[in-house]
Amino acid sequence: MRFDPKTEAVLDRASAACGARGAQLTPLRRTVLGLVQQSPTPIGAYALLDQLKGDRGAAAPPTVYRALDFLLAQRLVHRLEKLNAFVACHVHECGSDHDHAAQFLICDRCGAVTELEEPAITRAVEAAAGRAGFHATRATIEVEGTCARCAP
Ligand SMILES: [Zn+2]
Ligand SMILES: [Zn+2]
């Protein structure tokens, strides 16, 4: 599947970043990442399966789940628990060696999702976890409300 040039450029960087970590962005993983990247709102596994149907016949659900697990492990996408859907990471779009604590603003009305990277929140979460003797490896904060466009 071919995407627009901007998405292809992101996918090329993601592929290089995976390669540098000894992991391989296979054609299916690349296509799944491209679909997540292109989606204007968070996309669920079944919507991904639907979009893949046109491209490569019927992709089996476990194949898509494995591709998503890979992309999560490579820090290329985030999973939003509330929506049970995936978004591309826009902070480190080519992946980074450390997981950043991600914060998402989720609009209840239009479904728009904005990713924030607010270092003060990250530091506060890490410090609080540390005081509890807890070693945090991943922190996703989902904030629900109304976006600027939908605000009355
Ligand atoms: Zn991110
Ligand atoms: Zn909205």
Image: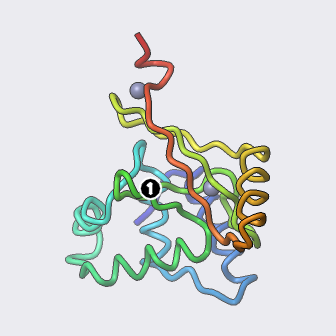
Vertical side of 37 occupied by 152: above or below: above
Would you identify the image quadrant in which residue 65 lies? bottom left
Residue 83 placement (x, y as % from top left): 35, 52
Q: Which residue is drawn at 70% across and 60% down?
A: 100
Badge 1 amino acid: Leu
Point out the residue furthest to the bottom here.
22
Describe residue 21's horizontal placement relative to residue 27 as left or right.
right
Residue 67 placement (x, y as % from top left): 43, 78
Vertical side of 85 occupied by 75: above or below: below
Q: Nearer the viewer, residue 83 or 63?
A: 83
Residue 148 placement (x, y as % from top left): 50, 20
Would you identify the image quadrant in which residue 150 lies? top left
Q: What element carries label 1?
A: strand
Q: Mark 1 points at which residue?
A: 80
Q: Which of 142 and 67 is in front in this view?
A: 142
Q: Which of 95 and 136 is in front in this view?
A: 136
Residue 98 placement (x, y as % from top left): 75, 69
Q: In which quarter of the image is the C terminus?
A: top left
Would you identify the image quadrant in which residue 126 lies? bottom right
Q: Which of 12 and 81 is in front in this view?
A: 81
Q: Residue at x 67, y 57 (%)?
A: 101
Q: Residue at x 63, y 51 (%)?
A: 90
Vertical side of 136 occupied by 84: above or below: above
